Image (tube, rainbow, N blue to C red):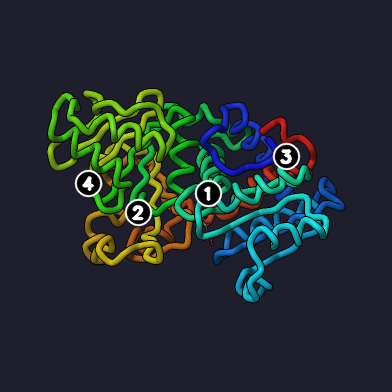
């Protein structure tokens, strides 16, 4: 692999390589110098066509800690304002000797298109997806995985540590590239992943299938096959099946499971939170919403906002994650966000540097066969 565009086809060995490499860099970052010469002479270009605070800054810092030279691009101050295309922009950075392109764009598939163009040109440039539309955000999911695994075993973070843990992902699943990448990584670990959102903020095909299952106890409805095919396209997962007997299910809170990947859907928060080890809450992405999808923020917070009181349903040592940026008081209460007993939000940001160092190192040092 010389690009990282999606976690859909990541293997367990690849996850473990990233986790272990990131752990080594975490140790480097705890030293006084914090820097290694690994990517000296290489050029990392951060091509951000959409705003970012933590992803762009942590990729830049990660590249600098590896002694690479960095180029930072923001579309609003670039020659794209004069009509230059995305691919011509990428080729301009290629001509300056860029080795790794880190791409963020508001449309799904832009990093893939740039990677395909680089491959067509026959150049050895790696492309890293730093978030594309509603599609994926692989480095975010990898840093979330690292944050959780290092909490369980700081010395040897590895995928198997999450086997049978219960992880709730709550909120605007529909618009969330973070949720899509996390679904791949967390379900690959053997964790039970429970998605909870109002039906309007779950992918439509999921919602249709859940409705179908609720109407027909055996899940034999006429549109089931259609929904399965479409859902496979959406998440490329194995065929859907009716909910397992152990999963909480009632007409008002239907859920389903997918064989080989323990993924459950809920329209209510409580079944997802019940006995959860980790709760990942997501930002309501108002910028991607049409008016009819946007719930009242007060009502949303009441039903799906994570608070200390609602965490009483979870395991006593439950931890809460959020990829940021946060709408304080909407998806999570302000006091919980700042409570170090529960909140891993700052640790996630810190982990981001080591994990992005690992990705840049594995791609830039020719050790990409490891991932
Ligand atoms: N989590 C995340 O992608 O944040 P930024 O948009 O600030 O990069």
Per the rendering, the mark at residue 268 is 4
Does residue 347 show up?
no
> What residue is shown with label 2?
172
Q: Which mark is first along the chain, 2 or 4?
A: 2
Residue 145 versus residue 2: which sits nearer the camera? 2
In this view of the protein, can residue 362 be seen by the observer?
yes
Q: CA distance from mark 2 to mark 3?
A: 32 Å
**Looking at the picture, how far across and down is residue 123, in whole percent?**
78, 45
Marks 3 and 1, how far apart in space? 18 Å
Q: Earlier in the sequence, mark 1 or mark 2?
A: 1
Circle number at residue 358: none
Task: Say left or right for 211 vs 358.
Answer: left
Image disc number at residue 137: 1
Q: Is residue 82 above or below residue 184?
A: below
Q: Residue at x 49, y 43 (%)?
A: 181
Q: What is the secondary structure assignment of the residue under circle 4? A: loop
Q: CA distance from mark 4 to mark 1?
A: 25 Å
Mark 4 in CB contact with mark 1 (< 8 angstroms) = no
Residue under the point 33% across and 46% down: 203
Which is closer to the viewer, label 4 or label 1? Answer: 1
Q: Dot 1, how many residues are within 10 Å of its Cα: few (below 14), some (14-19), or many (20+)?
A: many
Q: Nearer the viewer, mark 4 or mark 2?
A: 2
Q: CA distance from mark 4 to mark 3?
A: 41 Å
Q: Which residue is mark 3?
A: 362
Q: Secondary structure at mark 3?
A: helix
Upstream in the sequence, badge 4 or badge 1?
1
The picture places residue 316, in percent across and down from the top left corner, at 34, 41
166 vs 50, left or right, is left
User: Under tag 2, what secondary structure?
Assistant: loop
Q: Earlier in the sequence, mark 2 or mark 3?
A: 2
Cβ of mark 1 under 8 Å from ligand 1: the answer is: yes
Give the CA distance from mark 4 to mark 2. 13 Å
């Amino acid at each position: 692999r010389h690009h990282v565009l999606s976690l859909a086809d990541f293997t367990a060995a690849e996850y473990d390589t990233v986790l272990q490499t990131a752990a080594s860099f975490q140790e480097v970052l705890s030293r006084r110098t914090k820097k290694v010469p690994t990517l000296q002479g290489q050029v990392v270009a951060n091509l951000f066509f959409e705003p970012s605070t933590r992803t762009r800054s942590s990729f830049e810092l990660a590249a600098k800690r590896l002694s690479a030279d960095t180029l930072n691009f923001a579309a609003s101050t670039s020659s794209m304002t004069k009509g230059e295309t995305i691919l011509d922009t990428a080729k301009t950075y290629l001509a300056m000797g860029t080795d790794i392109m880190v791409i963020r764009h508001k449309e799904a598939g832009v990093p893939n298109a740039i990677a395909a163009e680089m491959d067509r040109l026959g150049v050895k440039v790696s492309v890293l997806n730093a978030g594309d539309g509603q599609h994926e955000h692989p480095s975010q999911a990898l840093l979330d995985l690292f944050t959780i695994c290092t909490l369980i075993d700081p010395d040897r973070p590895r995928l198997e540590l999450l086997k049978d843990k219960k992880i709730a992902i709550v909120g605007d699943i529909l618009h969330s590239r973070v949720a899509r990448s996390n679904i791949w990584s967390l379900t690959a670990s053997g964790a039970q992943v429970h998605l909870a959102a109002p039906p309007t903020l779950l992918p439509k095909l999921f919602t249709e299938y859940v409705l179908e299952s609720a109407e027909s106890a055996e899940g034999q409805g006429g549109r089931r096959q259609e929904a399965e095919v479409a859902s496979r396209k959406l998440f490329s997962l194995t065929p859907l099946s009716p909910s397992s007997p152990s999963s909480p299910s009632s007409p008002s809170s239907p859920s389903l499971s997918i064989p080989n990947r323990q993924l459950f859907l809920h329209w209510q928060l409580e079944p997802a939170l019940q006995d959860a080890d980790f709760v990942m809450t997501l930002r309501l992405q108002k910028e991607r919403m049409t008016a009819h999808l946007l719930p009242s923020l007060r009502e949303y917070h009441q039903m799906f906002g994570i608070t200390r009181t609602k965490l009483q349903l979870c395991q006593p040592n439950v931890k809460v994650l959020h990829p940021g940026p946060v709408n304080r008081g909407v998806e999570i209460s302000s006091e919980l966000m700042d409570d170090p007993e529960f909140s891993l939000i700052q640790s996630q940001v810190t982990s981001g540097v080591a994990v992005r160092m690992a990705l840049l190192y594995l791609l830039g040092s020719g050790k990409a066969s490891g991932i």
